[in-house]
Image (cartoon, coloured by chain):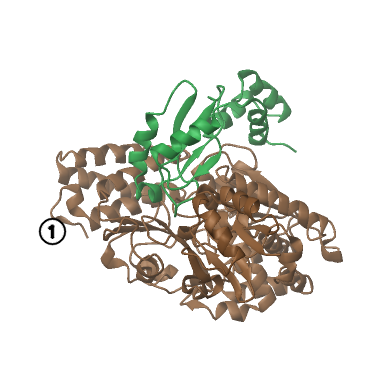
């Protein structure tokens, strides 16, 4: 038995995002209304309705990383933003003893710096 | 042939463990390289261990640049500037009481033979030889309390689930470890997932549940992959499935992955999320133990609660209950995080003071400046001043000073911290992560940010402080769950403990 959330996650795993026309299909598959599906789609931060950029950088802004300069790192990372690179924040990547933590297309960085993020972006670009 | 151990824990990977392992394999082609979980000495990661006749010799932190000289040392006499001696004799590790984390970091977490050789399955075998009531009684006698933060006695919860008539019962493990400063669930899931599955199967036998679900946050992709692999191994070995260890007992486990919502770590929001809905909290009662997942009786326990169970059943509840202090029995996996010199996982019996943890194990701040503040128990936990750290880590003692242990996360800040900024963040975080069900949480948090902004600008500070204090009271009393109910803790503790940071005189502090 599949749930609305699991269905949306599966759509996103396949397409990188949840296209508009998926809402009706998920609704039918889950015996739910389109409003229910839309409600789930807009509740969860991971789910997106537009194609993702080539590189997504998520800079942790949780307290443990704040204590070692995460706010300054966020400002530095923001300068690396471009048409292909999105800079976003996340609350906790579970790397709280080796902060500031950052994730570049799923790759976790510890004791991250502006330079290590820039390097990881270069490696992640197709 | 030399055996070399290199962690593949995410934290170790984040500082280059994969490159170190690859380079070692290249330079020492005849060596056997085993990828393990992390010992929890995170400031030493990547920590490389090498088998020797004396025991396992450690080196860390190893950078790729240090690999050639390390490879030479491994070929010679194991002498190297990064050497830390015998890992298991290192005081930082040796003085801990590794109950739940005994096997983490020692061997390949997905090697079922190594798991069994190191004592795995003893708890499950013992449990299956007992009646469900006896298992529940053992968990109750051990004094085990929920490690998610609330500290509810696990045995009582299991008893309720077992005693509630139902056609189906569930065991749901909460691995939505969203608190900043906590990573013990992740280290266990990546480092010894079979122990969690063993504990879940014991819970299934004890409560009559046949279906187990682990709800893991999406921010932990490596933990999800390791757990999925462990489930397949356990099914192959007959440790999960329709006929566990040939006893006819049925229990199986699946993984549900979260989608980036902090509030889904609240148990009823987690149930909604597992059912595929928006992660909005439910009113209690009914308790999930009576009406939980799909309305059926459900055990909801934290990863660490369940992972302590196999040891309790195998070694007997008395041994576990002999550890700890007051009504906080057993061990707690503390996680030293933030601006701390020796960050890592410290599993010790309850009762050690915060100062021993922060200044002893943690060795003070990473920046070398004095400790300025310590936040215990995640984003909803109080900030403590450096002079408040002599409190023993015990649920009741912590509550008595207006703090909480939560999931055991200890976040250290140095004295450069701006506590008004931290108080603002607590409200901002609540505004972003609130599920929206309760008005005080949904709107109060937004209002809280605005009020703290005015205080930080020095606008009618005392009037704004009065508004903020009122607001916190409404949030505390008028929210269904801990998100709105506990956000006032970091805010008010910052306001009380650091009046100057809010532009106030110390004598103006409200009781």
- Residue B141 lies, in percent from the top left, at 61, 77
- Residue A75 lies, in percent from the top left, at 34, 34
Instruction: Name the image quarter holding residue B235.
Output: bottom right
- Residue A68 lies, in percent from the top left, at 35, 49
Please give the chain letter of the residue carrying mark 1.
B
Q: Colour of chain A?
A: green
Q: Which residue is mark 1?
A: B507
B317, B411: nearer the viewer: B411
A51, B66: nearer the viewer: B66
Question: Which quadrant of the rendered structure holds the N terminus of chain B?
Answer: bottom right
Instruction: Name the image quarter holding residue B166.
Output: bottom right
- Residue found at x 65% / y 41%: B275
Q: Residues within 10 Å of mark 1 (few under 14, many from 20)?
A: few
Q: Tell me if I can see residue B440 in this picture.
A: no
Residue A85's place in the image compared with B360, above or below, is above
Kindly give the residue lying farthest to the top in the view shown: A21
Q: Tell me if I can see residue A39 in this picture.
A: yes
Residue B96's place in the image compared with B104, above or below, is below
Q: Is residue B192 left or right of residue B132?
A: left
- Residue B2 lies, in percent from the top left, at 67, 64
- Residue found at x 21% / y 47%: B466
Q: Colour of chain B?
A: brown
Q: Is residue B114 left or right of residue B76?
A: right
């Amino acid at each position: 038995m599949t749930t609305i959330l699991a269905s949306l996650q599966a759509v996103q795993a396949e397409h990188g995002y949840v296209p508009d026309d998926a809402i009706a299909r998920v609704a039918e598959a889950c015996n739910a209304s389109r409003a229910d599906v839309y409600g789930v789609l807009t509740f969860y931060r991971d789910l997106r309705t537009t194609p993702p950029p080539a590189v997504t950088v998520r800079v942790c802004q949780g307290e443990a990383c704040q204590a070692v300069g995460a706010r300054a790192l966020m400002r530095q990372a923001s300068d690396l933003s471009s048409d292909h690179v999105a800079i976003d924040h996340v609350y906790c990547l579970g790397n709280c003893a080796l902060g500031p933590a950052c994730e570049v297309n799923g790759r976790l960085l510890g004791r991250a710096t502006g330079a290590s993020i820039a390097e990881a972006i270069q490696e992640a670009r197709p | 042939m030399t055996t070399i151990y290199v962690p593949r824990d995410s934290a170790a990977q984040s500082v280059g463990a994969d490159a170190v392992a690859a380079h070692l394999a290249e330079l020492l082609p005849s060596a056997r390289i085993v990828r393990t979980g992390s010992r929890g000495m995170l400031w030493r990661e990547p920590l490389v261990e090498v088998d020797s006749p004396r025991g396992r010799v450690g080196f860390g932190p190893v950078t790729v640049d240090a690999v050639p000289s390390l490879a030479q040392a491994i070929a010679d006499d194991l002498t190297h500037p990064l050497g830390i001696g015998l890992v298991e004799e290192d005081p930082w590790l040796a003085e801990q009481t590794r109950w739940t984390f005994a096997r983490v970091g020692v061997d390949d977490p997905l090697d079922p033979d190594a798991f069994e050789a190191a004592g795995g399955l003893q708890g499950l075998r013992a449990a299956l030889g007992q009646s469900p009531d006896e298992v529940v009684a053992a968990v109750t006698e051990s004094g085990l309390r929920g490690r998610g933060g609330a500290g509810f006695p696990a045995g009582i919860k299991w008893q309720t689930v077992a005693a509630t008539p139902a056609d189906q019962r569930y065991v749901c493990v909460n691995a939505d470890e969203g608190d900043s400063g906590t990573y013990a669930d992740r280290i266990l899931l990546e480092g010894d997932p079979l122990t969690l599955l063993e504990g879940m199967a014991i819970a299934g036998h004890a409560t009559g549940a046949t279906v187990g679900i682990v709800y893991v946050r999406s921010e932990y992709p490596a933990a999800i992959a390791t757990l999925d692999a462990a489930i397949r191994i356990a099914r192959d070995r007959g440790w999960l499935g329709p006929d566990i260890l040939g006893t006819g007992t049925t229990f199986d486990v699946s993984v549900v992955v979260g989608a980036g919502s902090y509030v889904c770590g609240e148990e009823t929001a987690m149930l909604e999320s597992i059912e595929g809905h928006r992660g909005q909290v439910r009113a209690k009662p009914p308790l999930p133990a009576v009406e939980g997942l799909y309305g059926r009786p459900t055990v909801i326990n934290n990863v660490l609660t369940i992972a302590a169970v196999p040891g309790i059943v195998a070694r007997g509840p008395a041994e576990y209950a002999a550890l700890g202090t007051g009504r906080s029995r057993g061990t707690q996996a503390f996680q030293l995080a933030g601006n701390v010199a020796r960050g890592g996982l410290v599993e010790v019996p309850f009762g050690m003071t915060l100062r021993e943890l922060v200044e002893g194990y943690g060795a003070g701040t990473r920046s070398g400046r004095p400790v300025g503040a310590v936040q215990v128990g995640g984003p909803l936990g109080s900030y403590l001043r450096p002079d408040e750290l002599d409190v023993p880590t015990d649920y009741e003692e912590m509550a008595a000073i207006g703090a909480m242990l939560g999931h055991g996360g200890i976040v250290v800040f140095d004295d450069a911290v701006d506590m008004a900024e931290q108080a603002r963040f607590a409200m901002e975080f609540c505004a972003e992560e609130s599920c929206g069900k309760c008005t005080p949480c949904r709107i109060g948090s937004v209002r809280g940010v605005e009020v703290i902004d005015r205080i930080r600008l020095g606008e009618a500070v005392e009037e704004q402080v009065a508004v903020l204090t009122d607001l916190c009271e409404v949030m505390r009393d008028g929210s269904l769950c801990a998100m709105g109910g506990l956000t006032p803790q970091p805010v008010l503790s910052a306001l009380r403990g650091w009046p100057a940071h809010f532009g106030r005189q110390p004598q103006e502090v409200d009781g």
